[in-house]
Amino acid sequence: MKQIQIIIPDRALKDVDEILREAQVGGMTHYRVEGRGTTKAEAVAGGRGTMKYTPEYIPRTKVEVVVKDDQVDLLSRKIMDRLGANEISGKIFVLEVPLTFDIKTGRKGESAI
């Protein structure tokens, strides 16, 4: 099993959700994060709109899913194809998940996802 972590702009969440649903990924977690990378932050209005400042960290959405090993390449490719076509920047990280348990059913391994 693998955990896929996808860091994207907030506006791309719907696209990623659609891709995961089409691939019948059972569950997804997403939350708002902030960070810095190669993308430069744009100046935003502050106060009553009379001054602008450039934030040090850029707000993003982080999506996490756990999938079977054979789904990783397909999902990564679909995400990169759709978001890359819209010129949306982001990152995909893939991590090994040695064991998973379903708390309610007691299942473990791939049957728990």
Image: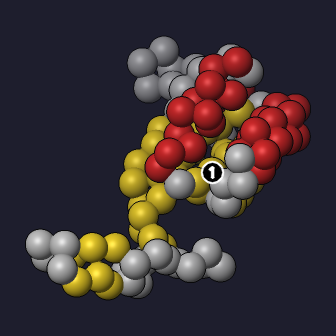
Q: How many marks?
A: 1
Judge whether residue 100 can be spotted in this image: no
**The residue positioned farthest toward the left in the image shown:** 48
**The residue positioned farthest toward the front in the image shown:** 50
Q: Secondary structure at mark 1?
A: strand
Given residues 54 and 81, the one toward you in this image is 54
| 71 is higher (above) or lower (below) than 86 | above
The residue indicated by pointer 1 is 6
| 24 is higher (above) or lower (below) than 3 | above
Displayed quadrant of residue 37: bottom right
Residue in the picture at 58% in, 54% down = 8
Measuring from the top left, give residue 110's x and y in whole percent. 71, 26
Residue in the picture at 54% in, 33% down = 14
Residue in the picture at 61% in, 34% down = 15
In this figure, which colouring scheme has been used for the structure?
A: secondary structure
Q: What amino acid type should be assigned to the residue bearing mark 1?
A: Ile
Along the horizontal axis of the image, is 15 left or right of 67?
left
Badge 1: few (under 14), some or many (20 or more) residues near its Cα, within 10 Å?
many
> Which quadrant does the C terminus fall into?
top right
Along the horizontal axis of the image, is 84 left or right of 40?
right
Measuring from the top left, give residue 1's x and y in whole percent. 75, 38
| 76 is higher (above) or lower (below) than 103 | below
Judge whether residue 33 can be spotted in this image: yes
Given residues 58 and 63, the one toward you in this image is 58
Measuring from the top left, give residue 75's x and y in whole percent. 78, 36
Along the horizontal axis of the image, is 42 left or right of 113?
left
Measuring from the top left, give residue 25's x and y in whole percent. 65, 23
